[in-house]
Image (spheres, helix red, strand yellow):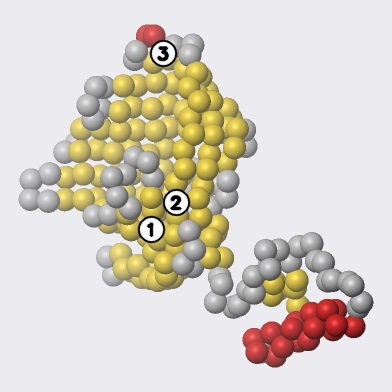
Amino acid sequence: MFKTTLTLAISSLITVASFNLSAASLDVHGDIKINGKTVIDNTGKFVTQDDELIDFDAYQPTEKKVIKLKQQDEENESIYTFYYDDTGYEYQETHYYDGELMFSLNWEKVSDTSRITKGVNNWSTSTSYTATDTIKHDTSYSAKLGDTIANFYVLDRAYTEHSDSAKVNTTDNIQDVVYFTPLVKTTYDFKGETLTDCVIYEFDAPWLPDSQLRTICKDYGIVQFGDYKLEAIE
C-alpha cells in the first residue's frame, strides 16, 4: 500500500471513530501496524519507510576480531585497538602512542548486571585499578536516521585494587550520558575492499571536547573516529 493511500485509510478510520461514535474516542495503547509494519508509533507519530531504525549493537562483530585504528602525523603514531571475543563482545580496548601504552580497559566475567573492569591510564598521573561494576541502568543504542538518542548508564564501581591505596574497598557511583545521531548509511573503503553496510554518526560524550564523527560497519564495529582510520583487521 502506497504511503498516500495508507495515510488516507488511517485518516478515514479516525474520522469514522470521531464522527460516528457519540462522545467516544479511539484510544490505542501501542503501535498501529499494517502487514506487521508499524505505521503509527506509540507516540502518535506516522512512521514512513524512510524512518529506518539503526541498532548500533547490530553493527558489532559477530565473531572474534581485532580492529586497529591509526592516526599518524609526521612525528607520532597513535593506535587504538578494539578486541572482540568469539561472540562479538568487546572485551578490551587499548591506546598506544609511539609504542607506549597510554590507556587500556579490560572487561571480564560479564553479565547483564555486573562485570570485572581493569583499567590503566598513563596520560597524566599513572592510574591502574581492578573493580567490580554493578550495572544499575543502561539504555539502548537504537535511533532513526537524523534522530539523536541519549544513552544513559549508571553503575557502582567497587575497587578491589587501585594504584591509590586510599581507593581500595571504596565505591564510586558513575553516571554518564552519551549521545548518538546516525546521519547516513554509507560504504567504507579499506585497502581496496569495500565494507558495504556502514553508518556515519555523530557522537557526543562528557570526555570529548567536541562532538565527533564516527563510522561503524556491520560485522566490524567502529572503523573510523575523528582522525583515526581503520588500519588492520585480524
Q: Is residue 51 left or right of residue 74?
A: right
Residue 173: image x %, image y %? 50, 25
In the image, is residue 1 above or below residue 165? below
Q: Earlier in the sequence, mark 3 or mark 1?
A: 3
Q: Residue furthest left?
A: 74
Q: What is the three-letter code of the residue carrying label 1? A: Glu
Where on the picture, by quarter, is residue 216?
bottom left
Q: Which residue is mark 1?
A: 202
Q: Looking at this view, is 51 or 214 the one in front? A: 51
Q: Which residue is mark 2?
A: 179
Q: Earlier in the sequence, mark 1 or mark 2?
A: 2
Q: Residue furthest front?
A: 23
Q: Residue at x 43, y 70 (%)?
A: 185
Checking the image for residue 79, the label placed there is none
In the image, is residue 202 above or below residue 27? above
Q: Nearer the viewer, mark 3 or mark 2?
A: 2
Checking the image for residue 167, the label placed there is 3
Would you call the spot at circle 3 few (<14 residues within 10 Å), some (14-19), or many (20 or more)? some
Question: How far apart are labels 3 and 2 at the CA level?
Answer: 30 Å
| Helix, strand or loop status at disc 2 | strand
Tell me, yes or no, if residue 232 can be seen here: no
Asked if labels 2 and 1 touch by Cβ distance under 8 angstroms, the answer is yes
In the image, is residue 116 above or below residue 21? above
Q: Is residue 196 left or right of residue 53?
A: left
